[in-house]
Amino acid sequence: MRLNEIKDKHGARKERVRVGRGIGSGLGKQGGRGGKGQTARTGVAIGGFEGGQMPLHRRLPKRGFNKWRRKDYNEINVGALQQAIDDKRLDAGKPVDLESLVAAGIIRRPKDGLRLLGNGEIKAKLSLTVNHASGTAKAAIEKAGGSIKLIVKKVLEADEIKRKKTAAKKSAGKTPKKPAGDAATEE
């Protein structure tokens, strides 16, 4: 074999279809685009349009709500923490936070934070730093002699002032109405 004899396998390269080249080609005249009108032209994007029929996305029922920019937290039960301590993957003497759980291999990746749930039993005294903790989880940790520190998201001062103003406006707009019987007694 020589360099000038090298070629692709049969069927590896496909020639493009040349439309609009006469009746005999099978794709002459309109070039496979059907008749005249909007869809015969270039630049047409009729997303979800079904020729005037009610589109599928409007026919189907909608329910629920998807929160914009919702946070995805790692969830861990107190029982899983105790299991990790028993397996010697986690040291009960050191403070436990998201980074230490990832380093120990209990959680795969940090995501947006850590949520502690109360399923299971814990005997070790732990010092935890989490974003959220359920009531049962707090009770279980405190019962074992541990402590939970919650990470509180800092709010900008300007945002806090704005919230207070809107709350004041809402409460000012809701003045109690006088009963109908009082108007007659005032005259």
Image (cartoon, rainbow, N blue to C red):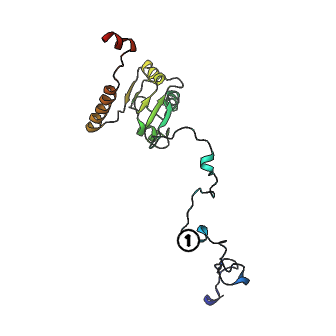
- Picture quarter containing residue 51? bottom right
Image coordinates for residue 3, horizontal then vertical, percent = 61, 88
Image coordinates for residue 4, horizontal then vertical, percent = 62, 90
Disc 1, SS: loop
Mark 1 burial class by Cα count in 10 Å: few <14, some 14-19, many 20+: few
Image coordinates for residue 186, horizontal then vertical, percent = 30, 11
- Side of 62 where 70 appears, left or right: left
Q: Is residue 12 above or below residue 97?
A: below
Q: Is residue 182 above or below residue 46?
A: above
- Residue that extends furthest to the front in the rendered view of this protein: 187
Q: Residue at the location (61% across, 71% down)? A: 40
- Residue that extends furthest to the top in the rendered view of this protein: 185
Q: Residue at the location (58% across, 41% down)? A: 62
Total tally of numbered discs in the picture: 1
- Side of 96 where 16 appears, left or right: right
- The amino acid sitting under disc 1 is Thr
Camera-nearest residue between 161 and 50 = 50
Q: Which residue is mark 1?
A: 42
Quadrant (top left, top right, bottom left, bottom right) of the C terminus: top left
Q: Is residue 73 above or below residue 24?
A: above
Image coordinates for residue 57, horizontal then vertical, percent = 60, 49
